[in-house]
Amino acid sequence: MWVTEMAALWPCILAAASGILAMDTPHARNSALYHLTKQLLQKYQKEVRPVHDWTEATTIYLDLSVHAILDVDAQNQKLKTSVWYREVWDDEFLSWNSSLFDEISEISLPRSAIWVPDIIINEFVDTERSPDLPYVYVNSSGTIKNSKPIQVVSACGLETYAFPFDVQNCSLTFNSILHTVEDVDLAFLRSREDINRDNMVFLNDSEWELLSVSSVYSIQQSSIGDFAQIQFNVVIRRRPLVYVVSLLIPSIFLMLVDLGSFYLPPNCRTRIVFKTSVLVGYTVFRVNMSNEVPRSAGSTPLIGVFFTVCMAFLVLSLSKSILLVKFLHDEQHSGQEQSLLCLLGDTEANRPRMEPRAQHAGLTGSSTWQDQQAQAGTLNEVWLQLQFIHNSLRSQDQVDQQEAEWLALLYRFDQLLFWSYFAVLGLYTITLGSLWALWSGL
């Protein structure tokens, strides 16, 4: 019976316990934050610019911090940077008295539920990549703070002439896409000096170094109205040490080796072999260099220009040596053939001819006549040998004289190439040193 009575009272006990727990547990609908959010967004119209007086402009305060340089694409003239973007504005419809809501002075609201400015970057050439941050902070005075990291892929006129001592200046221009300056105005959240010197968050372990971020405010005039815009000029410079070690110093060594080949005789076949080997080295180095030197349709790196000029000097010197060896070989061969033809011609022309009567007289002549004929034949043979030696020496002298004239001419041309090559190499070294000094002075 006692058990039956307890079973009957058990539902009442559970109901009482549930009531006590419900009284101790606060409901979300009873919180001050809930009532504040509901009050702010209940009659809020996000399609309307948040001002009571429509003639007053809404001022958007912008700030930008460069976090990292992700990629510099000189061929496509693109710059990829990671920036931290902040914008602050006043919303006159989102203010409250914090004393009425448990001293709540700041809350977060979804961006999709309130009015946000249509600020874009003019240099955008790709979709914006940033984490999805759906909330903004709003304080009791109606000031809204919107901050987010952005990966910006922007168009930039990249100059690679001074590679690897190049300095790039790329701009990021912010403005409203629809609202004129009478409706939406822009201003700086921080002073320009603080923005210019702000490199505390920049990652310095990349190839590029951040020099400054200058900023300027201007009014862009157009046929549809005047638009306020703020331009941030991101100035970066390349760290050249890795390229100095892997490109510049080896290129100078290769040019010095080629310059030393001018001390070999111009008519030496070993010089042709040596210069051919250097040309192969130039070609291999050029292929490796093309993978590291940035390519741009607007400008050519200075190192590529000097390297091409030095290759042209090498090919010109090699062609000159090949033509010289070929010419001297043809001259010597033609001189030997001419001497042989002269010898054969003189032998046939000076050979003694005897008529039939003389032969008959010789058969009946005295022995004294035969002795005189034998002595005359011997003298004639000696004379022919002397003429052959004279003609050979004269032909050889002509060949040697022509060879000496060509060698003298090509020696002068070789000296001209040498000093031109030396001047180009000196100009190349001085230019690189000057660019390095200018780079270090920034």
Image (tube, grey):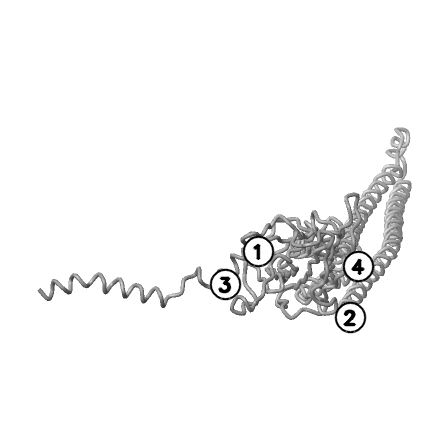
Query: Which residue lies under the disc numbered 4?
Result: 265
Q: Position of residue 3 (x, y in %)?
A: 11, 65
Disc 3 crowd rating (10 Å Cα; few below 14, some 14-19, many 20+) is some
Q: Which mark is residue 441?
A: 2
Q: Earlier in the sequence, mark 4 or mark 1?
A: 1
Q: Residue 304 sits in which quadrant?
A: bottom right
Q: Dot 4: what SS?
A: loop
- In this rendering, which labeled residue sits more in front, label 4 or label 1? 1
Q: Of the residues under marks 3 and 1, which one precedes in the sequence?
A: 3
Secondary structure of the residue carrying numbered label 2: helix
Q: Nearer the viewer, residue 346 or 133?
A: 133
Please name the residue that numbered disc 3 is placed on.
33
Which tag is nearer the camera, tag 3 or tag 1? 3
Q: Is residue 33 left or right of residue 182?
A: left
Q: How many marks?
A: 4
Residue 205 position by quadrant: bottom right
Q: Amino acid at mark 4?
A: Pro
Q: Position of residue 218 (x, y in %)?
A: 78, 56
Type of amino acid under label 2: Gly
The residue under label 3 is which amino acid type? Leu
Upstream in sequence: badge 1 or badge 2: 1
Please say whether residue 176 is visible from this viewpoint.
yes
- Residue 442 percent across, percent down from the top left: 77, 68
Q: Which mark is residue 130?
A: 1
Q: Residue furthest left?
A: 1
First in sequence: mark 2 vs mark 4? 4
Q: Is 10 situated left or right of 440 in this image?
A: left
Q: Secondary structure at mark 3?
A: helix
Callout in the foreground (4, 3): 3
The Cα atoms of the two marked residues, 4 and 3, are separated by 94 Å
What crowding class fits label 2: few (fewer than 14 Cα within 10 Å), some (14-19), or many (20 or more)?
few
Q: Nearer the viewer, residue 355 or 58?
A: 58
